[in-house]
Image: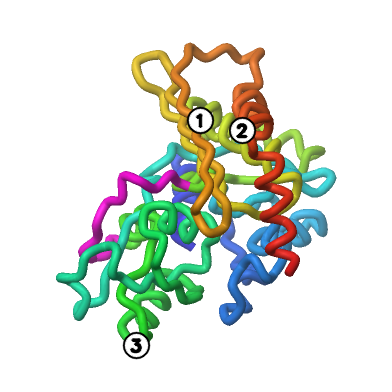
């Protein structure tokens, strides 16, 4: 709702009238199963896609990291807001403040967060946890684990007074911290309006990240991180693919001057695939299936 209200405010500032239509997604209805067991692709966007295609709404607002890289026919991401706080952070329960990172029992249902954490701390015990920030904080205090991982954007947007630790060894999920607005491809008028609130440099960065993800994953969920950042007219890109247990990792770090004719994300992903990533992805798909 915070994201929807943020988009609403930007449109109202331009003089447009808006109506908020809450839609509960399948991913939010089922908080008991980890996302990877739900067939993760599109689990948070499907219900809004249906509402869009049925003309019940004109635009849908999402966390872009939840939006599949291949969208349903006649739906596209028409605008993104400026990215804020893409980092992953650690939040501990009060009784675990003095434990070393390597000793912590971690609650997360994210394959990426588990794998990236395991690369650094291979003997970690994990528990599944789902829900919004408030739900997970409640589960954290009540559960048999020491800490959980959040996107910093969620904490900052809710203006929560929470103690958290930055984790420099984690790479964010592709397009983490970005609010996306999708609309129908054939709704030319709405698309033109949304372009007025689109943040161009964020759009360029997330296109690189999503092309990296699309080329690597082939419709499968996997421990993939990617972040592109503009720094003094150049883009700095960091990408990573890990095995599920974190024991194998392939990293890409590149700095380049942007050329809109080049598909950087695809190029970086192809490097990963050629350097052991193809076999790693096949193994990941097999393990998830099992």
**Marks 1 and 3 in Cβ contact (< 8 Å):** no
- Whether 161 is among the magenta residues is yes
Q: Is residue 68 left or right of residue 228?
A: right
Q: Is residue 133 visible?
A: yes
User: For the residue labelled by badge 1, is the local secondary structure a helix, a strand or a loop?
Assistant: strand
Query: What is the x, y in percent for residue 64?
Result: 57, 48
**Marks 3 and 2 in Cβ contact (< 8 Å):** no
**Residue 22: which quarter of the image?**
bottom right
Task: Name the mark on residue 142.
Answer: 3
Which of labels 3 and 2 is toward the front?
2
User: For the residue labelled by badge 3, is the local secondary structure a helix, a strand or a loop?
Assistant: helix
Q: Is residue 225 left or right of residue 124?
A: right
**Marks 2 and 1 in Cβ contact (< 8 Å):** yes
Q: Relative to the observer, which residue lies in front, 81 or 287? A: 287
Rate crowding at label 2 as few (under 14), some (14 to 19) or many (20 or more) other CA atoms within 10 Å. many
Magenta segment, prevailing SS (helix, strand or loop): loop
Task: Name the mark on residue 272.
Answer: 2
């Amino acid at each position: 709702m915070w994201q929807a209200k943020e988009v609403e405010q930007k449109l109202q500032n331009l003089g447009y009238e808006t109506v908020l239509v809450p839609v509960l997604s399948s991913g939010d209805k089922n908080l008991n199963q980890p996302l990877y067991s739900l067939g993760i692709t599109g689990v948070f966007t499907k219900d809004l896609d249906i509402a869009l295609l049925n003309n019940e709404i004109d635009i849908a607002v999402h966390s872009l990291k939840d939006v599949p890289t291949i969208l349903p026919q006649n739906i596209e991401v028409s605008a993104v807001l400026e990215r804020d706080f893409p980092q992953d952070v650690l939040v501990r329960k009060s009784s675990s403040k003095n434990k070393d990172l390597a000793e912590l029992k971690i609650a997360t249902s994210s394959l990426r967060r588990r794998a990236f954490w395991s690369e650094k701390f291979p003997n970690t015990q994990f528990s599944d946890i789902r829900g919004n920030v408030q739900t997970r904080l409640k589960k954290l205090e009540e559960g048999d684990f020491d800490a959980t991982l959040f996107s910093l954007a969620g904490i900052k947007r809710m203006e929560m007074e929470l103690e958290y630790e930055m984790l420099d060894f984690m790479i964010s999920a592709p397009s983490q911290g970005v609010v996306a607005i999708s609309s129908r491809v054939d709704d030319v008028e709405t698309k033109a309006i949304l372009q007025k609130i689109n943040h161009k440099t964020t759009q360029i960065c997330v296109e690189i990240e999503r092309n990296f993800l699309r080329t690597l994953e082939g419709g499968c969920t996997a421990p993939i991180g990617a972040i592109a950042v503009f720094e003094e007219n150049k883009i700095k890109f960091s990408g990573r693919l890990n095995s599920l247990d974190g024991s194998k990792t392939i990293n890409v770090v590149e700095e380049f001057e942007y050329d809109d004719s080049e598909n950087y994300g695809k190029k970086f992903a192809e490097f990963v695939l050629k350097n052991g990533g193809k076999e790693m992805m096949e193994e990941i798909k097999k393990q998830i299936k099992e």
